């Protein structure tokens, strides 16, 4: 007999077949489930498979939220959001999602390697995150757990800088009626604290009821503050203290920490961190503002092929000039 701890997400082993997919290795575990690298045995496509833990597989609320993640991602359909291709069930009845495999690193890892600050990369990544979430909000979907761990950096040769971010884990996303295709708002009506404390908005700290898209704006504001200064706006010894700081304490002004941060960016971040959600800009405006600030503040990233052509042209001009000078010297010498 297989116990609950050995079934569902906990039972998958390398080499095991799950529908058309061969499990390759465990990528990581979380409170809701486990994620595995897998390969479609028919077409050799690499994927990631996210399986709900067995202890949650019999709870309808968890299962609905898990499957709503797939619905949310496909409704948004944005290049900066991870793709989900399919859903299914393990032989033990645990639901799973077949997702895009992303060979890269979480933003949190990049931040640790860099000491927290990412320089000009900050604006590029923040613009992409804002664009993805603006698209989500336009579909009536609120992420509610935006944090560096849920942003993956992957290589993309089609972009000038060669990197793209992908927003992950819509597992506790709030979907409005338009996204759900049904009136199911009672699911978030209970006063529940949902999210990660460091990045939670004041209204999230008070409970899930009434949280809207401005909670994601606040979370991105926290991430931006952290990327610009090397630390989040609030650090506390306990979760209770941290939740209180989000609600009642003003963050240290960015200009005080680093006077070199562009004033326009300082104003934007502090507006995103407003305690009253009504005073925060919508995510679409955040994306537009970051784009405008980036064009002014960030050096233009030039494709390496263009750089090589420019370098070859410059070298050619220099060589031609040297030949002309040498020729002139020879002619003068003969005279």
Image (spheres, rainbow, N blue to C red):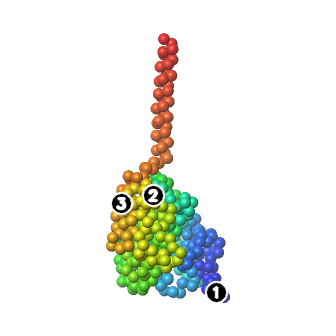
Q: CA distance from mark 2 to mark 1?
A: 55 Å
> What residue is pinned by disc 2?
258
Q: Is residue 152 visible?
A: no
Left or right, 125 with respect to 32, comes to: left
In percent of width and height, residue 311 lies at: 49, 39
Relative vertical location of residue 329 with respect to residue 20 in this rendering, above or below:
above
Are dots 1 and 3 in contact, CB under 8 Å? no
Residue furthest to the bottom in view is 1
Residue 219 showing in the rendered view: yes
Q: Pointers 2 and 3 in contact (CB under 8 A)?
A: no
2 or 3: tag closer to the N-terminus: 2
The residue that mark 1 highlights is 3
Please give the residue where the numbered disc 3 appears in the rendered image: 289
Query: Is label 2 in contact with label 1 (beta carbons under 8 Å)?
Result: no
Vertical position of residue 273 compared to residue 291: above or below: below
Residue closer to the observer: 169 or 229: 229
Task: Please rate how many residues cluster around mark 1, counting C-alpha atoms within 10 Å: few if below 14, some from 14 to 19, many from 20.
Answer: few
Alpha-carbon distance for marks 1 and 3? 53 Å
- Residue 106 image position (x, y, % from top left): 53, 65
| x and y percentages locating residue 252 in the rendered image | 44, 66
Element type at marker 1?
A: loop
Residue 12 quadrant: bottom right
- Where in the figure is residue 139, as x and y percent of width and height? 37, 72
Classify residue 138 by image quadrant: bottom left
- Judging depth in this view, the residue of 22 and 235 nearest the camera is 235
């Amino acid at each position: 007999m297989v116990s609950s701890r050995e079934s569902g997400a906990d039972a998958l082993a390398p080499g095991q077949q799950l529908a058309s997919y061969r499990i390759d290795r465990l990528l990581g575990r979380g409170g809701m489930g486990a994620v595995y690298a897998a390969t479609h045995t028919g077409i050799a496509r690499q994927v990631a498979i996210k399986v709900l833990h067995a202890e949650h597989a019999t709870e309808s609320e968890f299962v609905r939220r898990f499957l709503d993640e797939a619905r949310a991602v496909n409704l948004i359909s944005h290049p900066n959001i991870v793709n989900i291709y399919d859903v299914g069930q393990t032989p033990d009845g645990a639901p799973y999602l077949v997702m895009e495999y992303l060979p890269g690193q979480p933003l949190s890892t990049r931040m640790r390697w860099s000491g927290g600050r990412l320089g000009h990369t900050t604006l590029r990544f923040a613009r992409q995150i804002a664009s993805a979430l603006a698209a989500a909000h336009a579909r009536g979907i609120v992420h509610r757990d935006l944090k560096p761990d849920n942003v993956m950096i992957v290589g993309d040769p089609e972009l000038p800088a060669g990197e793209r971010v992908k927003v992950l884990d819509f597992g506790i996303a709030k979907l409005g009626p338009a996204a759900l295709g049904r009136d199911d708002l009672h699911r978030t009506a209970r006063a529940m604290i949902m999210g990660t404390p460091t990045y939670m908005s004041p209204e999230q700290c008070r409970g899930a009821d009434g949280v809207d898209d401005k909670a994601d704006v606040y979370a991105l504001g926290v991430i931006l503050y952290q990327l610009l200064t090397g630390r989040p706006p609030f650090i506390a010894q306990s979760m209770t203290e941290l939740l209180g700081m989000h609600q009642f304490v003003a963050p240290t002004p960015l200009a005080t920490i680093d006077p070199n941060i562009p004033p326009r960016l300082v104003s934007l971040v502090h507006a995103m961190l407003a305690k009253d959600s009504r005073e925060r800009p919508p995510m679409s405006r955040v994306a537009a503002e970051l784009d405008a600030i980036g064009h002014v503040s960030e050096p233009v990233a030039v494709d390496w092929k263009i750089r090589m052509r420019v370098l070859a042209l410059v070298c050619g001009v220099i060589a031609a000039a040297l030949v002309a000078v040498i020729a002139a010297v020879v002619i003068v010498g003969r005279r």
